[in-house]
Image (spheres, rainbow, N blue to C red):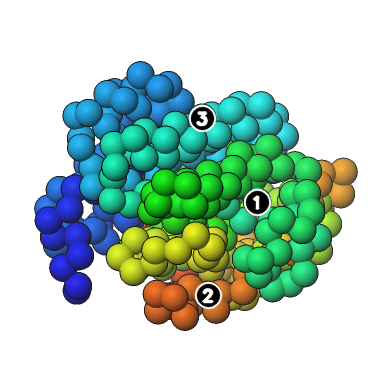
Amino acid sequence: MSGFFADRTVVITGGGGFLGGYVVEGLKERGCKNILVPKIEDYDLTKLDDIIRMYDRMKPDIVIHLAAVVGGIGANREHPGEFFYKNLMMGVQLIEQGRLRGIEKFVAIGTVCAYPKFTPVPFKEDDIWNGYPEETNAPYGLAKKMLLVQSQSYRAEYGFNSIFLLPVNLYGPGDNFDPASSHVIPALIKKCVDAVQCGADYIECWGTGAASREFIYVADAAEGILLATEKYNKGEPVNIGAGFEITIKELVEKIAKLTGFTGQIRWDKSRPDGQPRRRLDVLRAKVEFGFEAKMDFDEGLKRTIQWYVEHRKQQT
């Protein structure tokens, strides 16, 4: 370990969440002694007064901004205004207050949803402005993309060291399995495991199954973020991904097999597929700060399924 974090105070917004928990553990493993997580009960990070109070009390050297209002296609369609406003206001005000205080570094976490709907595969960071995002999650994606604009403009005018990372879809133990807001992998795991448990003979899935997605194991994503925090100090955005894609149909079949579900898979084609394809070009992260995802996808799915099975038992 480099010792980079040893004497720095690091604030992790969203540190109590899915990704945040892994980032906090990664910081501890790196010897960081001063890790602070603003709790949602104490600080509403959409409100300027709360952000000012958080900075005044915590006095960070580095902020890693993971906090976000997120969800799958359904949640994005139901709450486009909320997703736009809250994500924009959190990020913009956190960066501005960080600049005013002269903090050492701000790490802004974007989203693959910021890419244009028909980005050529694999998605290269330089393509991010070549079109409008996929409609179902555009408000969320654009709110996050404004943090890239802010980071680059603040670097140009003020010399403020803010970097912008673009992680692809996350999955892993501890994910959100709430059907109202979960992403595709936990939603499918829940459907399959629950169907096996209750003896259902079919599950229903959204869309056609033809769309493709890329997924990164959450511990790998946390490692990429921490490596970038240590080593990357440039204005260009950087993808954090695993560099592969799988169709939703293939994904459903894989999860069904791993969970032991042998029933019918029914496709509700009245529901949207979302973006047609997603796969990131991951070369920049490797070149700039030596990041490569390590977890085998099948093994990662097995660990996630096992976590859900155990968690489900604890809840019943």
Q: Is residue 303 above or below residue 134?
A: below
Q: Residue at x 81, y 60 (%)?
A: 118
What separation in Å lies between label 2 and label 1 (alpha carbons)?
18 Å
The residue wearing badge 3 is 89
Q: Is residue 310 above or below residue 315?
A: below
Neighbor class of circle 2 (other Cα within 10 Å; few <14, some 14-19, many 20+) is some
How many tags in the picture?
Answer: 3
Which of the two discs, 3 and 1, labels the residue nearer the N terminus? 3
Q: Say above or below: 127 vs 67.
A: below
Q: What kind of element bears circle 3?
A: helix
Q: Amino acid at mark 3?
A: Met
Q: Which mark is residue 284?
A: 2
Structural crowding at the residue carrying mark 3, measured as other residues with C-alpha within 10 Å and reported as few (<14), some (14–19) or many (≥20) = some
Disc 2 marks a residue whose amino acid type is Arg
149, 125: nearer the viewer: 149
- Examine the rendering and report whether any part of residue 59 can be seen: yes
Residue 276 horizontal side relative to residue 19, left or right: right
Amino acid residing under circle 1: Ala
- In the orientation shown, which residue stands out farthest toward the front? 157
